[in-house]
Image (cartoon, rainbow, N blue to C red):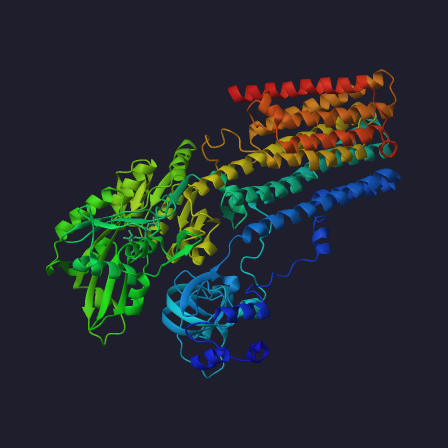
Amino acid sequence: MKIDKNKLDNYDWYKTSIENTLKKFETSKNGLSKKETVERLDNFGKNKLPSPAQKHPVLKFLSHYNNVLIYVLFAAAIVTALLGHWIDTIIILAVVVINGLISYIQEGKAEKALDAVKNMLSTTARIKREGEIREITAEEVVIGDIIYLKPGDKVPADLRLIESKNLSINEASLTGESVPASKKTEIFKQELALGDRKNMAYSSTIVTSGEGIGVVVATGKDTEIGRINQMISSVEKLKTPLIQQVDRFGKQLTLFILSLGFLVLLIGRFLRGTPFDELFLSVVGIAVAAIPEGLPAVITITLAIGVQRMAARNAIIRKLPAVETLGSVSIISSDKTGTLTEGEMTVKTVVTADKDYTISGNGYDPSGKLINKEKEVDLSKESVLKELLKNASLNNDARLVQKENNWIIEGSPTEGALKTLVAKSSYDNKTLAKNNPRLDSIPFNSDKKYMATLNQGDNNNIIYLKGAPEVVLDMCGEQLTEAGSKKLDKDYWGKRQDELASNGYRLLALAYKKIDKNTKELSLDHIQSEMIFLGIIGVMDPPRKEAIEAVKECQEANIKVKMITGDHATTASAIAAQLGIENPSEVITGNEINNLDDIELKEVIEKTYVFARVSPEHKLRLVTAMQELGYITAMTGDGVNDAPALKKSDIGVAMGINGTEATKEAAEMVLADDNFASIINAVEEGRTVYDNLKKALLFMLPTNGGEALVIMAAVLFGFSLPITPVQILWINMITAVTLALTLAFEPMEEDAMKRPPRDTGESLTPFSLLLRIGFVSVILTATTLGIYTWAISNDLALPLARSLAVNMLVYGEIFYLFNSRYMTKSSLNLKGFKATPWVWKAVGAVVVLQFMFVYFTPIQTIFDVAPLNLSHWLIIIGVNCLLFLVVELEKYISRNFY
Ligand code: ATP
């Protein structure tokens, strides 16, 4: 029967009992049936927050005109209109409109690209349906679903809580309150504000600690956050520090141009006695010439392309400024497990007090065997191993599932490996769970480094404990042997631990204790002492091959790689050595960090590369110290408590697969594949984006410089303009949107990862770049003026002389584009000539457009130019070949001498 949602909308669920809530939603603690969920999804839609209100397209379009550079062009249009030069007015206005339109379209494209990248970040939810807990994407959650919450989760919908175990939720995104609210399940009678409804959990808030279960009472736009229509990860503004820097630069340039114009006006009038009318036109010419109209669009698109390229290489950018910062990263602090290592774990060895077992098989496929002394074990004869396997299976939240012949796990890989271990024995995970249901649990976290459960037994209940060996050993008094429990032999276990860890195994120790049947809740007191030690499990988690390469690449790029892991010091050291991390034998542990003051810590950071048994608050201290030392840090994290360290670091990196939502929200970047190598890919792209932006400036500014100089020279020397303002606009438009844009698609320079990280204080236009810009401006001026004066002195008509000047400049830019593809490296080779398909397409487009400009009568008439003959073209091409060579010579000198 279809549930009537309208009737449900009027309820205050915090004033409704749990039973009643479940009844109203026709659900139970075991969750909905599959059929029901499909129907509800069809009837009520996906659990998606509405998109934030968008600016009206017209307003968005108009915003592109709110720019000083454009104001100057408007002023130029007015001046030309007052002087009666209507064609100029119309063309200037047309250019302004076209330019705005192009920026608008480009920005739309860039926003779409960012949106697509954001959509790659889907949130998951742990739900119970048909009595089984599983993970689904949050969008599929429907009203009446039963949701399980654990630390780090983002609450997927509005919930009435039906169970809470020390559950605390940070509701800042909804209420603005940053202190986490503790949650209960009791019903309230009185009217309460959102923040006081302790028995509710709201969509988009983050679980900070404890565990809880809730029934979904509202999804999508019906949730509280949906109602205030405030999407958390709404599209960011496309303004990054760099774009702001360029905006500022644009303003300064405008001021400079205006003053220059004024100066030219004065000189022209008083020194040369040129008529005002003509002078004004020249000043307008200088203004339109020097303004790089297309620059903002080129920069925006370059950044957006960078974001797309990073996403294609599994690095999802959440905050746009990160694209720029990535190029300056000088330390990458990475987790070990799953990031530097494969993260697909296999139990390879089990050590009990009496025996060592080896386990065959790889990955999560449960088709291996448990072997002792070369014989497959018979579990009925193994009293210690039996208890250990029960612990491994029951004290475990992972699920082992077979999908299309592939065995995969849901949940923590470490626990998944344990499920596979049990499945390789004659025990069955599902039967064990049925026979010994869980009564209570203390979840794992990276601070405590253990997890415990209370399970129902036959005559008594059983506590199972697993965790880092040194932590578990401290809680035990005895060890289980084939002959019963005996006093714990700590020395023996210490030795075995070191031996396993030095082989790179990740270690887990297991212990248990029987407790009377009336104990239904588990507290710290129960596990703190007198546990009985069962043994140690050695889990294989080999380094990722790509990570070994990536570490090497970082070293070449002068980026320090530090392993910051929660794992055992010896294990960390062994894996660090395999990865090629520097100085792997010198490991500092969390405990040792506690004993260091801030100055000592900084000394340690400079020479230590492996930090082990580190908890999240150590990470925060480490990142702070690194920043104080002047490093730009990228830091990875996955657990809920890692969020502060990620926020603090310059680039917080969260894990897309095994990371908590809390870290994803705090991060600048999310790795779709949890892979260390993807961070380096992002750094490569970051360096490339920055290079390409510089190349775009390097390319565009001399064009403007050249044009302005040509006009200035004309005024100062008192001859008519070699290029008219409208012709200049034509040049700027066609070159900015075609030639300059191709630089956004330039691939990484070969040496991009051989250079040290960029200094964040470094200017976008350092002296060497300014020198090139000035130099090329001068040669473009020389060639353009050269051909113009040649034409005039040979008595060619003015339209023809101007046609020659315009083409000389445009073709100069085509050739200069090939120079600009490499900042300092030579372009004089096959690779430089082949360029990218974009370059050749753009060159093709410009050639066609220039052809039309010269030979197509309507355009000819508008721009007042005359057709060229073959010898003219030969001169233009020949001179510009020379220009190309001269710029290459300058590059050669700058490569070798400064
Ligand atoms: P990294 O910080 O590099 O990801 P890690 O995963 O080893 O390393 P933690 O998750 O903090 O760091 O784990 C620390 C230790 O806690 C592990 O070495 C292991 O002994 C133990 N451990 C890990 N997962 C569990 C778990 N699910 N239950 C119990 N103990 C665990």
Looking at the image, residue 530 lies above or below residue 72: below
Q: Is residue 719 left or right of residue 486?
A: right
Quadrant in the picture for the N terminus? bottom right
Q: Position of residue 772 (x, y in %)?
A: 61, 26
Q: Residue at x 58, y 24 (%)?
A: 831
Residue 180 shows in the view: no
Residue 523 shows in the view: yes
Q: Residue at x 32, y 35 (%)?
A: 582
Q: Residue furthest top?
A: 794
Which quarter of the picture shows residue 18?
bottom left
Q: Is residue 847 left or right of residue 601?
A: right
Q: Position of residue 359 (x, y in %)?
A: 26, 48
Q: Nearer the viewer, residue 421 or 239?
A: 421
Q: Nearer the viewer, residue 548 or 272?
A: 548
Q: Nearer the viewer, residue 895 or 566?
A: 566
Q: Residue furthest bottom?
A: 189
Q: Is residue 660 left or right of residue 582?
A: right
Q: Nearer the viewer, residue 382 or 731?
A: 382
Q: Residue at x 41, y 53 (%)?
A: 658
Which quarter of the picture shows residue 163?
bottom left
Which quarter of the picture shows residue 452?
bottom left
Q: Position of residue 350 (x, y in %)?
A: 22, 51
Looking at the image, residue 272 lies above or below residue 319: above
Q: Residue at x 13, y 50 (%)?
A: 491
Looking at the image, residue 247 lies above or below residue 727: below
Q: Is residue 575 left or right of residue 113?
A: left
Looking at the image, residue 381 lies above or below residue 632: below
Q: Position of residue 895 (x, y in %)?
A: 53, 22
